[in-house]
Image: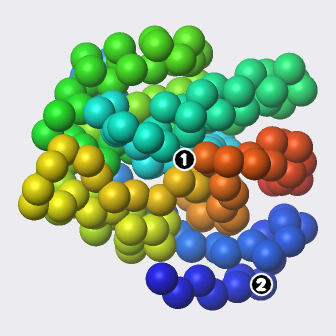
Amino acid sequence: MVFAAGCGNGGIKDAKNYPIENFTFTSHEGKEFGMSDLEGKVWIADFVFTNCADVCPPMTANMAKLQEKVKDEGVENVEFVSFSVDPAVDSPQVLKEFGEKFHVDFNNWTFLTGYSQEEIEKFALENFKTLVKKPQEGDQVIHGTDFYLVDQSGTMVKYYSGFKDVPFDDIIKDIKTLQ
């Protein structure tokens, strides 16, 4: 993977500034959800799947912790978006049940599916510069473990570890910088 440094975004150090293409997928509620729903909002994205044997449960727990910290800080107008990397398995109902296990607040956290495996692999690589790959054998999907900060205009500004040593305070500081 190649990561090029951007010229900065709202005072964020080492901003990447990758534009996210317009998308409309299917939410955990079975409704259309896309860039138009996120317009004017700062959002945090990640890539997970419900059948994940290792990194997705702690990533989702960390995202839930971040969601709670954002709320505790009184930061508003922030959305959380989890893209399933296993859309053949992760139906809206399966995603909703997965989120419920982590006590997520669905008011500002949306789990997405409703695309082909090929589409999510291409979308992740072209927009977030991250690998998603479902091997021919087995039921596990290879994917990155980062959280992605996206600004109000749909530009991916920065990414952070979402698995271990999550820099919660840095993420909240950067969210506040964008607002």
| Residue 90 locus on image (x, y percent) | 23, 32
In terms of depth relative to the viewer, which is nearer, 161 or 138?
A: 138
> At 45% from the left edge and 20% from the top edge, which residue is drawn?
99
Is residue 179 visible in the rendered structure shown here?
A: no
Residue 80 vertical position relative to residue 176 in the rendered view, above or below: above
* Residue type of the residue flagged with mark 1: Ala
Could you say which is closer to the camera, residue 94 or residue 35? 94
Q: Which mark is residue 45?
A: 1
- Residue in the picture at 79% in, 76% down: 14
SS at mark 1? Answer: strand
Position of 111 relative to 125 (above/below): above
Q: Quadrant of residue 137?
A: bottom left
Around disc 2, counting alpha carbons within 10 Å, would you say few (fewer than 14), some (14 to 19), or many (20 or more)?
few
Disc ID at residue 7: 2
Query: Whole-percent x and y of residue 23?
Result: 34, 53
Residue 95 in the image: state x and y as whole percent: 33, 24
Relative to 96, say whether 14 is above or below.
below
